[in-house]
Image (tube, helix red, strand yellow):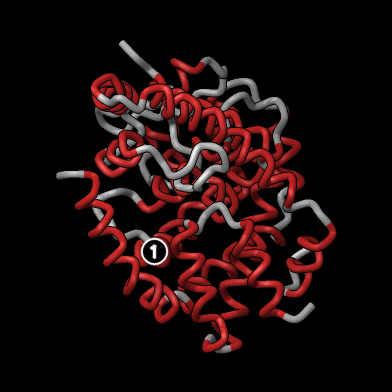
């Protein structure tokens, strides 16, 4: 499908998507917020101490057994000794399968992490998607938030959390202009960014055929800078005041 | 700062909501109920807290993500 056609479809879908989000967004958003507040307030100090001493997967299992999956998950966010990112363990801790829990390796090597996080045949590696909100709200909250994000995302065949990460790339960056068509086409066609090899192959096959190669490189550099600048801006007094208006410190 | 003003600020800096959708929401903001403003504002506030707490990881992952598009055989 041509990029222009995709853009047209996307714009048309957005016209109604936002209205839908506002209609159905309140209740699931409220549930998500309640979930966040519960997680923030739940005492995990003991679990944090226990996780901080972890060196083996067996010990992780002991923590999960003793404190429960949620507490272990929260503790992993704070544990400095843990090489594996807490959000990467969402598919593990969120799943009931003991085999998946066993597979949560803590040694820290990327290849080992990737193998440990394998869900079926998928391998997680370079290009893994960031789920910043999932990191905070957990698997249950993420599922509820998906409902809201799906209404924002006019392409339901793409995981909305991936769209959220790609929303960063959807920013029109000053000096670069609009997102290059090659990037947008890749974004729309990538269904599972966990399969990095597939994603890279698809991306490179599109990019090498595209005359926008130089623009894509510049765009990529500017996206990273843009994201960093925007996160820094969130620490400014005006933003602190804005969050305080909703009771969030 | 009232909640509507705060929501506008939060929307402007949100990374979760795309620019197109931000414009759409801002266009409708005067007709939003206080419940809607409160719900969305709170969520966007938590988004910011989470982003700031995980800035290093996010930038690292964003770089990896962008590198995917730069790969040329």
Q: Is A1 or A77 nearer to us in this picture?
A: A1
Q: Is residue A186 above or below residue A167?
A: above
Q: Residue shown at 52%/89% (left/top)?
A: B31
- Chain letter belonging to callout 1: A
For label 1, the crowd category at 10 Å Cα-Cα, with few meaning under 14, some 14 to 19 and many 20 or more, is: many
Give the left or right position of residue A65, taking residue A213 as reference: right
Tell me the SS state at disc 1. helix
Q: Quadrant of the N terminus of chain A?
A: top left
Left or right position of A73 against B69: right
Question: For the C terminus of chain A, which image quadrant?
Answer: bottom right
In this orientation, does residue B40 appear? yes
Where residue A123 appears, as percent x and y from the top left, is: 34, 25
In the image, is residue A43 above or below residue A212? below
Q: Position of residue A164 (x, y in %)?
A: 45, 50
- Residue drawn at (26%, 31%) of the image: A120
Residue A91 sits in quarter: top left
Residue A248: quadrant of the picture:
bottom right
Where does residue B50 sit, x and y in percent of width and height? 65, 50
In the image, B57 versus A58, the foreground residue is B57
In this view, which residue lies farthest toward the top? B73
Residue at image location 50% in from the left, 81% down from the top = B28
């Amino acid at each position: 499908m041509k990029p222009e056609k995709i853009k047209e479809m996307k714009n048309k879908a957005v016209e109604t998507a936002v209205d839908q989000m506002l209609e159905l967004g309140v209740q699931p958003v409220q549930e998500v917020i309640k979930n966040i507040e519960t997680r923030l307030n739940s005492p995990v100090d003991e679990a944090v101490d226990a996780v901080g001493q972890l060196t083996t997967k067996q010990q992780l299992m002991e923590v999960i057994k003793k404190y429960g999956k949620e507490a272990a998950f929260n503790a992993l966010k704070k544990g400095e000794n843990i090489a594996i990112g807490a959000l990467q363990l969402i598919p593990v801790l969120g799943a009931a399968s003991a085999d998946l829990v066993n597979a949560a390796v803590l040694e820290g090597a990327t290849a080992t992490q990737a193998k440990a996080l394998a869900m079926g045949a998928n391998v997680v590696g370079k290009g893994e998607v960031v789920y910043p909100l999932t990191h905070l709200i957990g698997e249950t909250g993420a599922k509820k938030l998906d409902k809201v994000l799906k209404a924002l995302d006019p392409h339901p065949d793409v995981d909305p959390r991936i769209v959220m990460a790609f929303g960063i790339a959807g920013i029109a960056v000053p000096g670069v202009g609009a997102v290059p068509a090659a990037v947008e086409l890749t974004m729309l066609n990538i269904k599972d960014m966990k399969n990095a090899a597939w994603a890279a192959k698809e991306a490179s096959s599109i990019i090498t055929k595209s005359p926008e190669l130089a623009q894509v490189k510049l765009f990529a550099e500017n996206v990273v800078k843009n994201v960093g600048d925007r996160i820094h801006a969130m620490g400014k007094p005006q933003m602190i005041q804005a969050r305080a208006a909703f009771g969030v410190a | 700062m009232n909640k509507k003003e705060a929501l506008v600020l939060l929307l402007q800096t949100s990374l979760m909501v795309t620019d197109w959708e931000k414009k759409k929401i801002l266009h409708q903001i005067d007709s939003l109920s206080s419940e809607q403003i409160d719900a969305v504002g709170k969520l966007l506030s938590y988004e910011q807290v989470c982003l700031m707490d995980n800035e290093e990881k996010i930038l690292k992952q964003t770089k990896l993500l962008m590198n995917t598009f730069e790969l040329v055989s």
